[in-house]
Amino acid sequence: MQDLMKFAPYLLMFVVLYFFMIRPQQKRVKNEKEFESGLKVGDKIITKSGIHAKIVELAETSAIIETMSGKLKIERSAISMEMSAALNKKA
């Protein structure tokens, strides 16, 4: 019983670390993957670097977007979920 009490603080620290750091990160990654898979041609997006564009073509891991100055090929992971959601909420 006393051996168990020695490890109780470490166990408690792990539980707190899991619920406040690891689990929210896993949830965020899951939401980003769902966002990337839900993209479709014609969606207005903002990249993580701040480029405003419209999706013209989609491939498995990349997208071709159209900006005011032309077309660009980017990775789907370069599209910002938060900024694109805010853009589409305003429109």
Image: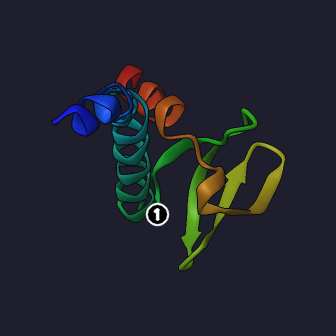
- How would you rate the neighbour count of disc 1 (Cα within 10 Å): few for under 14, some for 14-19, many for 20 or more? few
User: Can you name the residue that lies furthest to the bottom here?
Assistant: 60
In the rendered structure, the answer to whether residue 74 lies left or right of residue 26 reads right
Tell me which residue sits at (51%, 44%) in the image: 44
Q: Is residue 11 visible?
A: yes
Q: Is residue 15 visible?
A: no
Work out which quarter of the rendered image holds the C terminus and state it: top left
**Residue 58 location, quadrant:** bottom right
Q: Position of residue 73 (x, y in %)?
A: 75, 66
**Nearest the eye: 32 or 72:** 32
Q: Position of residue 55 (x, y in %)?
A: 56, 58
Tell me which residue sits at (33%, 35%) in the image: 7
Tell me which residue sits at (44%, 50%) in the image: 29
Tell me which residue sits at (76%, 42%) in the image: 68
**Nearest the eye: 37 or 25:** 25
**Residue 75 location, quadrant:** bottom right
User: Can you name the residue that lies furthest to the left here?
Assistant: 1
Q: Position of residue 72 (x, y in %)?
A: 78, 60
In the rendered structure, the answer to whether residue 77 lies left or right of residue 39 reads right
Total labels: the figure holds 1
SS class, disc 1: loop
User: Can you name the residue that lies furthest to the right here?
Assistant: 69
User: Can you name the residue that lies furthest to the front here?
Assistant: 2
Work out which quarter of the rendered image holds the N terminus and state it: top left
| Residue of label 1 | 41
Q: How is the image coloured?
A: rainbow
In the rendered structure, the answer to whether residue 15 lies left or right of residue 32 reads left
Q: Amino acid at mark 1?
A: Val
**Nearest the eye: 52 or 37:** 37
